[in-house]
Amino acid sequence: MAVFTTQRHIAVMREIAAKAALDRVDQAARRLEDLLHTVRSDVLTLAEWPIWESYLSAHKDSDRTFWREKLVVQLRTFADLKPAYKSVVYSDEIGADVLRATRKGTATIVRRADAPLSPWAQKVIVRTAQLAPRQTHWEFVGDQYRSTLICASPAALRQTHRRSAVWLELDAASLFEIGAPREADQSSLALFDDEGRLRFARQPAALNTLASKPSRQYVDSHNRLVSVAVVSIFPGQGVPRWRLALIEPAAVLNAGVHDFRAAFLGVMGLALLIATILSVWLARQFVQPLRRVYQASQRIGRGDFDVQLSDTTGDEIGALAEQINMMAGQLQAAHEDFERRLSDKTEQLIHAERLSTIGRTAAAVAHEINNPSGIISMYAQMLAEPPMTPTSKSSR
């Protein structure tokens, strides 16, 4: 029964550890969604700035300079208020006119981009041009471990009807700064797209691929526990559904078991210590007083009534000790009274025996004296009578 209970507890601890891993990845996914919501909201805010449209639609150089200066001020202010973004970029439909605000330490530098643009920038412009207003496009740029996340949206150009794009560049590593595993921890986070391709990982060789429809949790071929949560932002609006994976050694499933065993042994040791202390206390509180009561009763049984028990417990045993003291005192008094009365009766019997002996002696002496006295008296009477004459003899 104890073995079954222990195995059941171990199974429950493994379930708790697996559930805790799912909770951690779910919390990380929700925080990531909140961050992506903020990025999307910032991009849509930038897309609705009318200064960009005024800058592109200006025909005079003086007007373009005026609107460009105003745009630079606003971009610098925005970049100062949002230091998490690497760059804020505005571009026309062909990438010929690009204005970029870049963070350099604590300073913000706003300048026009040099042509030609990089292939990924051209791809972002092309894909953004195909979106409807207030839709967003997400793109990962760079390798899997030093990646940049791009969030782009069409800029509103109502008067000129031209196509334009605005996007934010965010270091992918910052996506996992909040709630990420500690550096000393052996776990890692990795982000995958819908097709299961690795887009970003905090540690190299975390996972190369992920199934397109993976289970929520499984142990891979490298004996690692993989917990998966879906990350989605406004589905149906051009935003992908990513999957966030928490990869950690499968030994974490047994971490709770080890803790349980350690706690169990600790509890057993504490229980043993408490039992020992309790037994010593019970011995002092009950066993020793009972032993003294038992020894006192044996002494009383042997006739030793000089017994005095001290009340050291203050409970029923103490009350019993007091009663034994009273009983011993009463028995002592009764014994002394009995000894006194026995002594008196013994003296009376001795006196009566002495009187009886004297009476018997006196009777014997009187008998012994009475017989010779009677003979002497008879002879005395005979001598006292006158002598008899012969006449007296014949007449007779």
Image: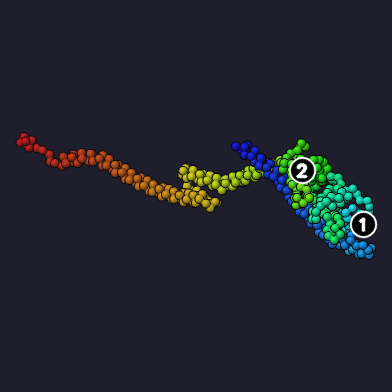
Vertically, is 165 above or below 379?
below
In the image, 257 versus 153, the foreground residue is: 153
Residue at image point 89% right, 61% down:
57
Residue 216 vs 84, above or below: the answer is above
Amino acid identity at mark 1: Arg
Position in image of residue 3 (x %, y %): 63, 37
Q: Which residue is mark 1?
A: 112
Q: Please rate how many residues cluster around mark 1, counting C-alpha atoms within 10 Å: few if below 14, some from 14 to 19, many from 20.
A: some
| Quadrant, the C terminus | top left
* First reached walking from the N terminus: tag 2 or tag 1: 1
Is 344 positioned to the left or the right of 202 in the image? Answer: left
Decide if residue 5 is in sight here.
yes
Q: Residue tagged by mark 2?
A: 247
Residue 170 shows up from this direction: no
Coloring basis for residues: rainbow
Q: Secondary structure at mark 1?
A: strand
Give amino acid for label 2. Answer: Ile
Q: Is residue 368 above or below residue 322?
A: above
On the image, the x and y values in percent for residue 351 come to 34, 46
Q: Quadrant of the N terminus?
A: top right
Q: Secondary structure at mark 2?
A: strand
- Asked which quadrant contains residue 228, the reply is top right
Comparing 260 with 387, the one in front is: 260
- How many numbered marks are there? 2
Q: Residue furthest top?
A: 394
Return the x and y of residue 8 as percentages of the image width and height: 64, 39
User: What's the distance in space between the residues labelled 2 and 1, CA to CA?
Assistant: 42 Å
Q: Position of residue 114 (x, y in %)?
A: 94, 53
Q: Residue at x 74, y 47 (%)?
A: 230
